[in-house]
Image (cartoon, rainbow, N blue to C red):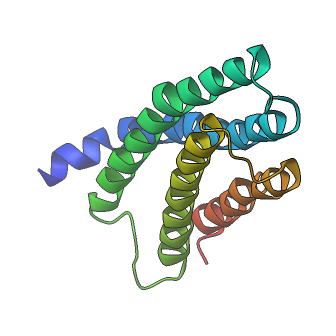
Amino acid sequence: MTDLLASAYPFVKSFHVMAVIAWMAGLFYLPRLFVYHAERGMAEGEPRASLTVMQDKLLRVIMRPAMVATWLSGLTLVLTPGIVDWGLAWPWTKAACVLAMTWFHGWCAAERRRLAGGASRGGRRYRLMNEVPTLLMIGIVLSVIVKF
């Protein structure tokens, strides 16, 4: 089993990077759609309906499968012997940021439901929340590349 994981490692890592890119694209874009929804689409009609459909499809068709693929491939990488030194700080920092990113994904799903139901927290709040995935991404990339 160990040899199989080691030989599959470059493929799993490649798949992981692709899944992360897809997930992050959604995490960057969905809060921006929330801003548009809150500022221009709260009235009944076409803008609101279109934004609601866009948000739903982005979450269900792209973000959720990408998150699951990211987690599965990431856990597979962690289980590959010799890859992670848990005595260092970086795997713990990355893990905390990934958990926070998963929480943010859940927050986005809850906000999508709120907006679809006609509630809004306001464009400014969504603009601020739009920065959360960027900050978490910085923590993840620095952890993995610098390995402090």
Q: Position of residue 72 (x, y in %)?
A: 33, 47
x 81%, y 40%: residue: 38
Q: Is any atom of residue 100 visible in this view?
A: yes
User: Residue at the top extreme?
Assistant: 46
Residue closer to the observer: 16 or 133: 133
**In the rendered image, the vertical position of residue 30 relative to residue 3, given as above or below:** above
**Split into 4 quadrants, where in the image is the C terminus?**
bottom right
Where is residue 9 shown, x and y percent of the image?
34, 44
Residue 14 seen in the figure: no
Q: Give the image quarter of residue 117.
A: top right
Q: Position of residue 89 (x, y in %)?
A: 53, 82
Up the image or down, 64 lies above or below 41; here it is below
Q: Residue at x 32, y 66 (%)?
A: 82
Which residue is rendered at x = 64% and y = 26% of the image? Answer: 52
The total number of labels drawn is 0
- Left or right of 46? Residue 18 is left
Q: Nearer the viewer, residue 27 or 6?
A: 27
Residue lying farthest bottom? Answer: 87
Residue 29 vs residue 1: left or right? Answer: right
For image coordinates 88% across by 54% down, the residue present is: 124
> Residue 34: x percent and y percent?
74, 40
Q: Is residue 61 left or right of residue 135?
A: left
Q: Is residue 135 above or below residue 108?
A: below
Q: Residue furthest left?
A: 1
Q: Is 2 rendered above or below residue 21?
A: below
Residue farthest to the front? Answer: 44
